[in-house]
Structure formats: C-alpha cells, structure tokens
Amino acid sequence: MTNKAKEKIVILGHSGFVGKYLYQKMQKEPIFEVYGFSSREVNLLNLGTYQKLADICDEKTVIVMAAAVLRSKKDGLLALADNVKMAINLADFLSSTKIKHLIYLSTIAIYGSKNEAPITEVGPINPNSFYSSAKACSELILKRICEKLGIALTTLRMGKIYGEGDTTSPIFIFSHNIFLNRLIEIYGDGSHRLYPVHQNDFFGVIKRTILEEIRGDYNVTPSFGITLLELIGLLFELSGKKVEIKFKPAVNSPVSLIFNTSKFKETFGNFPLISLEEGLKEYFTPITP
C-alpha cells in the first residue's frame, strides 16, 4: 500500500498575522507540504517576481491568498489600487500556471455597516471603505479567472481573527490596557460590533476546505458578534480588573450586522467551536501570575 501524496499548499502573505499562523500550523501537519511567501520573496505587485511561484505550482497545488494591504495600516486610494493590483497579477499568473484550488481570504466588511435582514452569502454587498471595496473587486476578478480556467475557488469572508500573535485588534488593545491599568478609548458610543473568529477555528475551516475540496463563498463569522462595550465588560470579568473608559467622537458609522450562517453550518458544522470567553482567556493567561 502506498501512502497518499501530501497536499501541496502555497500561502501568499505568510509573514502577516493570519498567514503566519496558518503557515506554522500547516507545517506541523504531516499531510501538508507547505510553502510560504511574503512580499520579500514574491512581491505580488510585481508580476515579474512570480517566477518563484511558477517553479513550485502545478495542477495539484492549493494557493491560499492571505496577502493584503490591511485597513489598519492604510485605507485610501493607493491601498485600494494595490489590493486590486495583487488580485489582477494573481489572475494573470493563474492564466499561465494551472493550479488545483485557490482559497481567497476576504472579509465580511464587504457587506457594509448595517443590514435590514440577516446576511447570506448571496445577499447584496455594500462596501463602505477603500479596503472593503478592494476586497469586493478582488473577489470578482478571481471568481472570473477561476471560472474561465476551471480552478476550484473558495472565498472565505472572514470576521475578525484573533489569538496568539494578535497585536492590532480591539481585543488585544483592550486586554493589554487592562493588564497595564491604562484607560481604554472607544470611538463612538460603544455600540460598534466585532465578529471574532478564533485562529484555531479559522485553521479548522481552512484545513477542511483543502481536504474536502470545498468550493464556494462562505461567511466565516458568528451571527451577531459582540459590541465594544460588551467586549470590555467580558474582559473586565475575565481579568478581574477594571480601568477607565474614555469615549471619543465616532470616526465612522458603527457596524451592526446580523448573519444567517445556515450555509456555513450545513457545510462545516457548528461554529465557533471555541467560545469567545475561552478565546479571550488566552490574552490574560500568559501574563497572569
């Protein structure tokens, strides 16, 4: 009996928070042969640097597109242009190098800030930032090229991934300030909702997507999320500490979305597997005596 060949995985953007975690987890899986590329190895804005990918990719390869100019770094026209250009260059590359499966990490931000009915994967989108507009455009570009070339495509519209290595999310900032006895600043009245997804749950979705060759669009998010004030209250409870909260004028409209997750649950099962309470404890455990 011969052993089944390993799944060949290429992660683009493997030095970022999400890509790095995914790369490190996959390296520990004997069923995966994993390659990671950051912008230093393959500049996705320069099609001429894609040769390194061409030397690796074949018809059995799965590419996970985790690279992006994040909104937390900059959210303007130049960032929009760069994110869309990455998608165009990737589509151009796929036209000359056939792969088996593309997994594109998108965002629930493409739905905007409010909805009247629970959101499904086929519902209307309403991107209201340069970042979310670029993600929506990139989804369309990659969907068209994959349809044309017969490449399996999975688009995962992610909530806010959190966990080990997180240094930018409100979850990290709030918990860090609580530990240091610093005040917490909130823009707006605290009604803005987050949709946290623990990195282990995220990895589980990626792993099943690869092994079961799952295709299509999926909203990877809890149905209701949690408001910033609710999050702070939960962090106070878990840490056993309280700090001052300072409210500042809102910069953007608060996000308040509700998701119909029936399609996701039908394919992947119950979600999340790790409760928010359990996930948040990790932010205090390493630093609590």
Image (cartoon, rainbow, N blue to C red):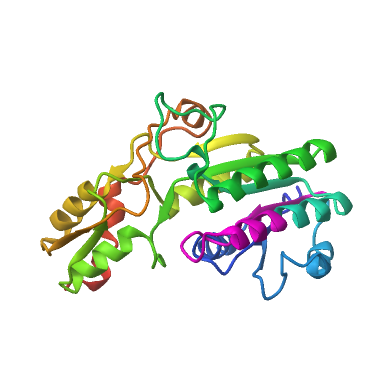
User: Range of the magenta residues?
Assistant: 59-86
Quarter placement of the C terminus: bottom left
Residue drawn where x is 61% and y is 41% of the image: 155
Which residue lies most toward the top here?
117
Is residue 101 or residue 183 the one in the foreground?
A: 183
| Location of residue 98 in the rendering, given as x and y in whole percent from the top left corner | 84, 49
Q: Quadrant of residue 261?
A: top left
Camera sees residue 173: yes
- Name the residue nearer the viewer: 220 or 87: 87
- Residue 112 vs 243, above or below: the answer is above
Q: Position of residue 53 (x, y in %)?
A: 78, 64
284 lies above or below 134: below
Task: Find the residue positioned furthest to the right.
Answer: 96
Is 256 placed left or right of 96 in the picture? Answer: left
Q: Is residue 68 visible?
A: no
Q: Is residue 276 left or right of residue 152?
A: left
Q: Position of residue 240 (x, y in %)?
A: 10, 61
In the displayed structure image, the side of residue 154 where residue 194 appears, left or right = left
Q: How many marks?
A: 0
Residue 278: horizontal and vertical position, in percent?
Answer: 27, 51
Residue at the image position 86 percent from the left and 49 percent from the top: 95
- Is residue 60 a member of the stretch shown in magenta? yes
At a point 77% along the width and 67% down the height, the residue shown is: 46
Q: Is residue 5 magenta?
A: no
Depth check: give the residue in front, 159 or 135.
135
